[in-house]
Image (cartoon, grey):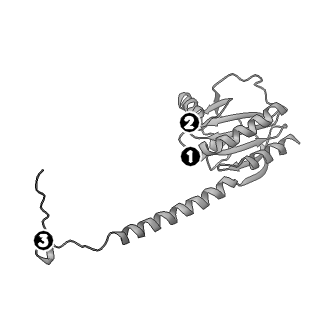
Amino acid sequence: MPNLTLHHRETDEDAVDTTPLHSDRMLRALVVGAVALMIGLFGWTRWQGPVEHVDRPLPTLPVRLLEPVADASVAGMPEVIHVWLPGCGACAAEAAAYEVVRARYASQGVRFLSVSVVSDPAATRRAAAAYGLGGPLASTTGNLLEALQLDVVPSTVWISKEGRVVSVGSGALSERVLDRETRRILR
């Protein structure tokens, strides 16, 4: 085994600061912790999901269905459109709650459509499978966010049986919020 020798410098100008690194590490840890706390609080606020109640016509949507739909006509049926993005952590976090609500209300005459804002059908299918999103699935063929007047992904849009946008949820929503707004379109 080789003999290791530590070298040290003899002059002040060559001296290395020997201040304990733990104070720098502690400061960094505090800053990282504070930032994580702010992100956590912001994320929790978003998780509760601000929902805006609106009344506007449903625009023509630039989407491509990725699988057959039993009844392509949505006239007279309330609908929930879930807008998401592959690779989006909030979208992945919301997926389980969305699927619970979809399973609960699909048999009650509510149509659900999960639309990826990327135009690549293969990427949409892969991400949907990874997130546990069921169908029907669609991907965008244009600017879906602009068409639906959305600022955030994920977003959820509730459409009345009269074909009007009645609620828009921004950010990842809890099961409670998704359920409440879906019940609202059944009235």
> In the rendered structure, which amino acid carries the disc numbered 3?
Arg
10 Å crowding of disc 1: few (<14), some (14-19), many (20+): few
Numbered label attached to residue 56: none
Q: Nearer the viewer, residue 45 or 1?
A: 1
Tell me where residue 48 appears, x and y as whole percent.
Answer: 70, 54
Name the residue carrying label 2: 118
Q: Residue at x 75, y 25 (%)?
A: 72
Q: Secondary structure at mark 1?
A: helix
Q: SS at mark 2?
A: loop
Label located before the other in sequence (3 or 1): 3
Q: Which mark is residue 9?
A: 3
Given the image, on which type of amino acid does mark 1 rest? Gly
Q: CA distance from mark 2 to mark 1?
A: 15 Å
Residue identifier under label 1: 89
CA distance for labels 3 and 1: 50 Å
Residue 116 is situated, as x and y percent measured from the top left of the image, at: 60, 36
Seen in the picture, residue 165 relative to 48 is either above or below; the reply is above
